[in-house]
Amino acid sequence: MMNQKMQCLEDTTAVCILETFSHQPSMMLADKMLKEIGKEKAQNTYKERVPSLPSGQFVRSYFSSFSNDGISHTQDDYKEENDEEVCGYAKARQLFCSNNYDGIIEHCTEEIETNGPQMAEAILMRATFYLLMGQALEARPDLDRLINMEDSHPKLRANALIKRGSMHMQEGNSTEAMSDFATAVRIDPDNQDIYHHRGQLNLLLEQIEDASRDFEKCTKLKEDFALAHAQHSYAKYRLAILQQSPMQMQSAMQMLEECTRKFPTCAEAFALFAQAQSDQGQFQQADENFQKATALEPDNPTAYVHRGLLYLTWKKDADGSLAMIKKALDIDNKCDFAYETLGTIEVQRGNMNVAKEYFEKAIELARTEMEMAHLYSLCVAAEAQNNVTKKYKITPPSALNM
């Protein structure tokens, strides 16, 4: 059955190439088939994947998106001289604070199974690390359990709802995701993290006005939360584009610039300002701000990827762009965003075999089945184009003739 689908996809791809990707019905059919094949391949592969932790930088970046989750910002003092006596959640916290994430799940489990005094915190931390490893099935029972523990701290229950809501979103269920966020608001209405993360989900849903309101609410609850200020400014920029308002655009760009002045150590503020400047054709200024972002967080690969894309748009320099994005992989060889971007650029250059290799590396790092399905669709598209060009001796139009 899969072979028949691939043959059908190749025929449709050949038609798209001959039509120079200009006939909408053919392209829609190819897109539909790619999604079906990608979904089927992901269903078969995802359940066989070996879970692994992402890079330490990714873990730290994830936790930094919460201003107070009840587990990562507590001021516990676990003295090294008593290391042999430390166990359970206390040991998990000690490992966490030393950026040593292996063993955290094991020690949280110890706290949970012995009904330790910090069982609620241990449940939340274990669920969080399951999510970071792409083990949503293992995380779900822990999140459900904590959410139903009405005697636990509202902040812990709200954080569990944020994470379960985000998990629903990753599974494509936006209704249940928003329901969890609404419940979190009822439990802990002044919790800034709820509005911050709901704002991010609203951005994904293209509900830009709702996202802007959520980010604004977050910044009012915690005025020094730099990340939320940066994302509020960027949401305002997105809203200006949506409403095609030059006045709002000018105001949003000023907000983004002001955010970099107010929070000069926030790399995300410079990166988002740079993305907006790149969109507006202010390439030199954008490059300068991406450089500031990488200087502030030299171990964060994302800004290098965005800077590589800037090179492509600005200088039409595919080789320079690829070199910059590969710097991201020198920093973090588990950066799936970098592999996906490299694959996409190689497709545009017509290097389908190379693109396929990059997509396959990204697939190995996928943390959700939905993400894996998307990457498989990209990989299969590259494979189909490669097969068609060899079989029928036709050449697809290249967006990057360099």
Image (tube, rainbow, N blue to C red):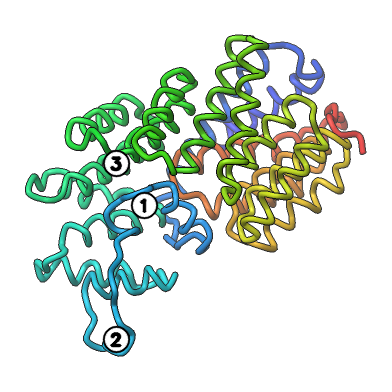
Q: Nearer the viewer, residue 79 or 333?
A: 79
Q: Residues within 10 Å of mark 2 (few under 14, many from 20)?
A: few
**Image position, residue 19 (x, y; %):** 80, 15
Left or right of residue 91, residue 279 in this image: right
Q: In the image, what residue occupies the spot 85% across and 48% down?
A: 320
Proximity of marks 2 and 1: CB atoms separated by less than 8 Å: no
In space, the residues marked 3 and 2 are separated at their CA atoms by 33 Å
**Along the line of sight, which residue is nearer the eye, 159 or 24?**
159
Q: Earlier in the sequence, mark 3 or mark 2?
A: 2
Q: Residue at x 32, y 50 (%)?
A: 68
User: Residue 293 appears at what percent x and percent y?
Assistant: 66, 49
| Label 3 sits on residue | 164
For residue 401, the mark is none
Residue positioned 58% across, 32% down in the render: 4
Which residue is tagged 1? Answer: 131
Q: Which mark is residue 83?
A: 2
Residue 195 locus on image (x, y percent): 35, 33
